[in-house]
Image (cartoon, rainbow, N blue to C red):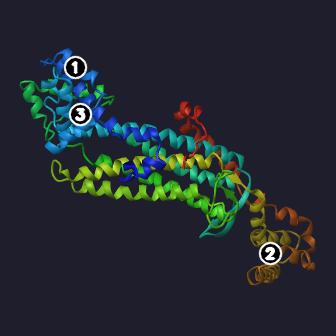
Amino acid sequence: MSASYEGYKSPLSTRYASKEMQFLFSDQNKFSTWRQLWVWLAKAEHSLGLDITEEQIAQMEQHMKDIDFEAAAAEERLTRHDVMAHVHVFAKQCPVAAPVIHLGATSCYVGDNTDLIVLRDALKLLLPRVATVVGRLQQFAETYKALPTLGFTHLQPAQLTTVGKRACLWIQDLLMDERALRRCLEDLRFRGVKGTTGTQASFLELFNGDSQKVKQLDKLVTQLAGFSKPYAVTGQTYSRKVDVEVMAALASLGTTIHKMCSDLRILASRKELEEPFESTQIGSSAMPYKRNPMRSERCCALARHLITLFSNAANTHATQWLERTLDDSANRRLTLSEGFLAADAALLTLLNISQGLVVYPKVIERHIAQELPFMSTENIIMAMVKAGGDRQVCHEKIRVLSQEAGAQVKQYGKDNDLISRVRNDAYFAPILDQLDHILDARTFTGRASEQVDEFIAEEVQPVLARYSDALKSVQDVQLNI
């Protein structure tokens, strides 16, 4: 048996998440970013007058990507300290620069700042994914904005809506997720250069008590990393409240995806709508006829995992004592990476679904026909009153006929025959020529079609405009597994 199959591998990397998101949380990206941070620190310190040469900086830049992972692992087994292990390995590759690598910094300088860079880049990757799903669902909503369908409350048939209007409910939730994720990105800052407990004491020592140079150092490194500003104060770490806000937005996205895909699964069970189903896809090993909504089920599974991760971030922040404790470390290695990988995987699957949704209008029409006669009774009564009838007499007539028709449906499994009973009752002769209009499903959907147009123009288009470039390059998503 191959040794590569004897260790645990995360399904998020082997089955679900994109290569782009996996790279952001990879060791290569993490440790090369550490080295980049050491370069930025040296450059800023050099520019502010510390004895660091351009030759030292150049040597560090030359080796930012070529990391000897085996050597670093061996060093960590000896030192039990991941940052110092990589400092030692980097120093061996850059002997001229060795004396100035990590000068004045603490481990959280590279650890926390790297995490913030990865969070920023991961948010930038997710946001266009949300927009592309919204864009595809917008097209779906426009196509079916006027197609009547049964609305449901309490999972029981209620007043009609339209297929497109229902899709707008999904879109509206996604727009709220886009707003929350974008706010996380806009609010995100850099830890910067803060020292062991956030006081910048080591850097004040390096610059001989020159407080302005220490402030400038913090600003320069922050700008080099592409952030507009650092957090004004930190302990040893940036506040884990930041992780709480980010994971809250991701968990909220999970609730949206779960709700939408649960709706799709319900509609698939009614055969009104189906997710994409490939010609060679097998729905069941025992039942060849089945077309299971496995994509929607996958989204729900990933979304549930994503939702649960929020409590990890919340509990971690709640238990960070004073300037920090290390019981956040192992937890965050799992929570942040899995949160973004799960969100990425769920969004890609959701995009695949939204690109190939299939609607079955005839099935929807048949379901409406089963319920609309009961829903139309008030309209029939009003038509009879306009034709000179007595409302109370008409109400009683309709009540009796409705009970009889209901018995046919519930006790004998037959179709709803209320309208046939109305047509065969001489009392309703004055309005028989109006029944077809009264029973036109389109007259029961209110402003649903107009609401779709208004919602897209006023709410959806302004958001999608932010992602116009990303939307131009959207391709159909193919799921590997």
Q: In the rendered view, does 52 fall on the left or right side of 303?
A: left
**Circle nearer the N terminus (2, 1):** 1
Task: Give the residue type at disc 2.
Answer: Asn
Q: In the rendered view, does 273 fall on the left or right side of 128?
A: right
Disc 3 is placed on an element classified as: loop
Disc 2 is placed on an element classified as: loop
Q: Which residue is mark 3?
A: 192
Mark number displayed over residue 416: 2
Mark number displayed over residue 366: none
Pointer 2 with pointer 1, Cβ within 8 A: no
Quadrant of residue 89 within the rendered picture: top left
Q: In the rendered view, does 199 fall on the left or right side of 34?
A: left
| Position of residue 160 measured from the top left corner of the image (x, y, whole percent) | 70, 62
Residue 284, relative to residue 481: is it above or below? below
- Residue under the image location 36 percent in, 41 percent down: 25
Q: Nearest the camera: 317 or 96?
A: 96
| Position of residue 260 measured from the top left corner of the image (x, y, whole percent) | 56, 56
**Circle nearer the N terminus (3, 1):** 1
Give me the C-alpha separation between circle 2 and circle 1: 82 Å
Give me the C-alpha separation between circle 3 and circle 1: 19 Å
Task: Give the residue type at disc 1.
Answer: Ile
- Count residues near mark 1 (Cα–Cα under 10 Å), then give few for <14, some for 14-19, many for 20+: many
- Residue under the image location 47 percent in, 51 percent down: 253
Task: Give the residue type at disc 3.
Answer: Gly
Q: In the rendered view, does 406 fall on the left or right side of 219?
A: right
Q: Which residue is mark 1?
A: 57
Mark 2 or 1: the one toward you:
1
- Count residues near mark 2 (Cα–Cα under 10 Å), then give few for <14, some for 14-19, many for 20+: many
Total numbered circles: 3
Residue at the limit of the structure toward the top, as seen here? 54
| Position of residue 333 measured from the top left corner of the image (x, y, whole percent) | 30, 48
Disc 1 is placed on an element classified as: helix
